[in-house]
Image: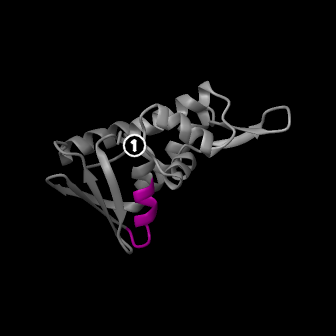
Amino acid sequence: MKERAARLKAVRNLIKTYRIESQEALLGYLQKEGFIVTQATLSRDLKLLKVGKISDGHNGYVYSLPGDDEQQETERTYAHDFLRGYISIEWSGNMVVIKTYSGHSDAVALAVDTLALEDVLGTLAGRDDTVFVCLREGITGEGFMKHMKERIPELED
């Protein structure tokens, strides 16, 4: 199975290239591109990408991506949520632990997911104040922090 970031890029390109009316059609295009994905995963991807449906001018609706300005604003919103919620970031091997203020773990994990860093295999929000980030093999905590700072320049060590 191809990486999540590659799949998200493929979804964007397919929506820009084809007139796609349903998730089933999009799943078909993704399969032709070599992606094996469930409908539930595709639904999450569409939500993450802020994909909407717009009128095709006839009697149907097609998928549409938000404008670049809107996408940048969305990323800034999540970056702000991250900065507002995190306390500290530590790592060991390919595991990163982000301590958050009480009740902010979900927002911080969602922010990391939304940034769609290729370094990240996945996140797990703890019950209240901890986020675990599993990094890809060979990626270090230092590498993760470097990429996070590229996306969120205000991030401190």
Query: In the rendering, at what x and y percent does residue 155 appear?
Result: 34, 47
Q: Is residue 132 magenta?
A: no
The residue labelled by disc 1 is 4
- In the shown orientation, is residue 61 left or right of residue 58? left
Closer to us: 33 or 84: 33
Provide residue 104's location: percent of width, then percent of height: 43, 66
| 33 left or right of 142 in image | right
| Residue beneath the point at 52% across and 48% down | 42
**Range of residues picked out in magenta:** 101-110
Seen from the viewer's position, the closer of residues 127 and 142 is: 127
Is residue 14 something that shows in the picture?
A: yes
Residue at left 61%, top 39%? 25
Which colour style is shown? one colour
SS state under label 1: helix
Name the outermost residue toward the left. Answer: 93
Q: Can residue 11 be seen by looking at this rendering?
A: no
137 over 12 or under it: above or below: below
| Between 104 and 117, the one nearer to me in the picture | 117
- Residue at 18% x, 52% y is 94
Q: Residue furthest top?
A: 17
Amino acid type assigned to the residue bearing label 1 in the image: Arg
Q: Is residue 35 left or right of residue 132?
A: right
Could you tell me residue 135's position as x and y percent? Answer: 25, 49
Question: Which residue is drawn at the image coordinates 39% and 74% (left, top)?
Answer: 128
Residue 118: x percent and y percent?
A: 33, 40
Quadrant showing the N terminus: top left
